[in-house]
Amino acid sequence: MSKNSRLVYSTESGRIDAPSQSLAPPDSDGIVRIQRSSKGRGGKSVSVITGLGLGKGELKTLAKALKQVCGVGGSVKDWDIEIQGDMRDKLKTELEKRGYTVKLAGG
């Protein structure tokens, strides 16, 4: 078997789960960044919030609250929160109310 192959199923043990990511959030510089992205989404844009430095449970709770404020859907992916649509201004206002230092990043 090649070093670069990804085994996803074995007849001996069944489905093989991908190695899980680190359980600790990545280090943050204390600044939350919000950027608009549409790569890989068929031209639809999302607002991506990075640098929160929260655990998975806290991220999901915050994402739920932000989705309700904006009235749209979204998800948590790889320590980032993705909110559907270009909601950067609403998100910046809400996060600043919650005590975060926020910067709008990208275009």
Image (cartoon, rainbow, N blue to C red):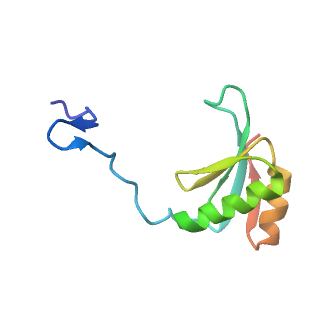
Q: Residue 104: x percent and y percent?
A: 77, 52
Q: Residue furthest top?
A: 42
Residue at figure coordinates x 34%, y 45% from the top left = 18
Residue at figure coordinates x 85%, y 53% from the top left = 89
Q: Is residue 54 above or below residue 2?
A: below
Q: Residue 12: which quarter of the image?
A: top left
The answer, for residue 98, to whether it is visible in the render is yes
- Disc count in the image? 0
Residue at figure coordinates x 23%, y 41% from the top left = 14
Q: Nearer the viewer, residue 93 or 75?
A: 75
Q: Is residue 33 above or below residue 11?
A: below
Judge left or right: residue 65 versus residue 54. right
The answer, for residue 7, to whether it is visible in the render is no
Q: Is residue 20 above or below residue 59?
A: above
Image quarter (top left, top right, bottom left or bottom right) of the C terminus: top right
Judge left or right: residue 22 versus residue 77. left
Judge left or right: residue 93 versus residue 3. right
Q: Nearer the viewer, residue 101 or 52?
A: 52
Q: Residue 78: x percent and y percent?
A: 52, 51
Q: Residue 79: x percent and y percent?
A: 55, 56
Q: Nearer the viewer, residue 9 or 93?
A: 9
Q: Residue 21: x percent and y percent?
A: 40, 55
Q: Residue 103: which quarter of the image?
A: bottom right
